[in-house]
């Protein structure tokens, strides 16, 4: 039996290239929106942290308007990919660090913004990670969270989380907006904005990106066809297995200590 | 290792300062007696990947 951190590592380390090229990850209205929010909130001298940077799409987007971005991930091959792409694009201000979201290796009050995109659903202890992000931002600093949002309707939510876990055994859960709000408040962040977008997940590429085994892919299809009407409607299941989730962006500011 | 990055890195456990050991290319936390490796210029700040310092090495740090 292996622990969760090892599972995440095994799932993601061989897939850096797939994530670099994935349109869901490389593009998206959330990425542009995040870039604008950060550019408007802080001067070009600002410094950012990207927690669970994966192939680095958020780091690259933020680096355009800031003086440096520290990109942290627990997968060495994701970080090598970030270093390689940063060098290709002439972005010398991106620094990569291997580490754990729940035990950040940075001094208190270092960053103007602590950000994370499509990573938090792998965090087994999200509250610890949010507290760590609070610790490493400067007084009045910002928190930016982007991820697939869990569903408020538990029937739909159970189906969503099950589909995700079947596809990727390192999935923990898509936390709901309400859960994020509680975690942010408990870590002394004040919410200043929320936006969400429907994101269509194309079944074949969704499965291929993670190299989901065939037996589990079959279970995903089985779960979709047997799902009740409410679930089919909300997640917009299509005949080829594609479906639609919501990507949420939470924007918050550290309360004064 | 980038100098600016070195300035903001601390031990992920105790959040105390780290000492960069050029010869072995490691980041040392005296308090936790751990040496974090730097691989391909990327600091590896995971407890599981860190090397436990010997008594001799800890003594030599003082």
Image (tube, coloured by chain):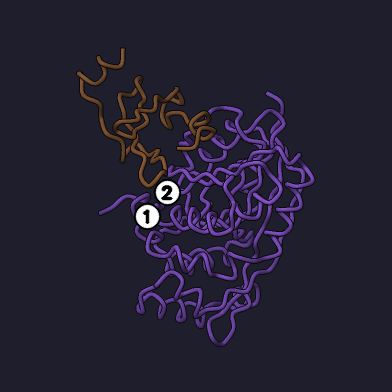
Chain colours: A purple, B brown
Q: CA distance from mark 1 to mark 2?
A: 7 Å
Could you tell me which secondary element the residue under label 1 belongs to?
helix
* Rendering coords of residue A117 (x, y %): 59, 54
Q: Which quadrant would the C terminus of chain B be assigned to in this image? A: top left
Front-most of A81 and A121?
A81
- Say which element carries label 2: loop
Q: Which mark is residue B13?
A: none
Q: Name the chain under label 1.
A: A
Foreground residue among A170 and A22: A22
Q: Where is residue A21 shown, x and y percent of the image?
A: 53, 69
Q: Which residue in the rendered view is the most extreme toward the top?
A: B62
Q: Are marks 1 and 2 on the same chain?
A: yes
Which circle marks residue A9 in the picture?
A: 1
Residue A145 on image: x %, y %: 63, 49
Q: Do labels 1 and 2 touch, CB within 8 Å?
A: yes
Tell me which residue sits at (61%, 54%) in the image: A60
Rendered image quadrant of residue A103 = top left
Residue receiving disc 2: A74
């Amino acid at each position: 039996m292996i622990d969760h951190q090892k599972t995440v590592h095994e799932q993601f380390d061989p897939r850096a290239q797939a994530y670099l090229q994935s349109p869901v990850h490389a593009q998206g209205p959330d990425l542009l929106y995040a870039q604008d929010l950060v550019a408007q909130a802080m001067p070009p001298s600002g410094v950012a942290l990207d927690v669970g940077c994966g192939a680095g799409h958020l780091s690259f987007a933020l680096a355009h308007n800031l003086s440096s971005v520290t990109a942290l991930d627990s997968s060495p091959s994701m970080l090598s990919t970030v270093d390689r792409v940063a060098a290709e694009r002439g972005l010398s201000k991106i620094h990569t660090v291997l580490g754990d979201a729940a035990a950040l290796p940075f001094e208190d009050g270092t960053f103007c913004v602590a950000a994370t995109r499509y990573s938090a659903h792998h965090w087994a202890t999200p509250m610890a990670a949010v507290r760590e992000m609070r610790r490493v931002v400067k007084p009045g600093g910002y928190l930016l969270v982007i991820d697939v949002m869990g569903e408020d309707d538990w029937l739909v939510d159970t189906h969503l989380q099950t589909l995700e876990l079947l596809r990727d055994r390192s999935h923990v859960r898509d936390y709901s907006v309400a859960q994020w709000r509680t975690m942010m408040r408990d870590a002394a962040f004040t919410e200043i904005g929320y936006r969400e977008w429907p994101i269509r997940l194309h079944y074949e590429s969704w499965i291929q990106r993670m190299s989901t085994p065939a037996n589990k892919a079959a279970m995903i299809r089985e779960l979709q066809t047997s799902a009740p009407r409410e679930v089919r409607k909300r997640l917009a299941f299509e005949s080829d297995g594609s479906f639609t989730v919501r990507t949420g962006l939470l924007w918050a500011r550290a309360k004064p200590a | 290792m980038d100098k600016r990055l070195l300035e903001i890195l601390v031990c992920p456990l105790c959040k105390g300062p780290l000492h960069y050991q050029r010869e072995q290319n490691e980041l040392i936390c005296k308090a936790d007696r751990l040496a974090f490796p730097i691989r391909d210029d990327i600091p590896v700040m995971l407890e599981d990947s860190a090397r436990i310092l010997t008594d001799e090495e800890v003594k030599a740090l003082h």
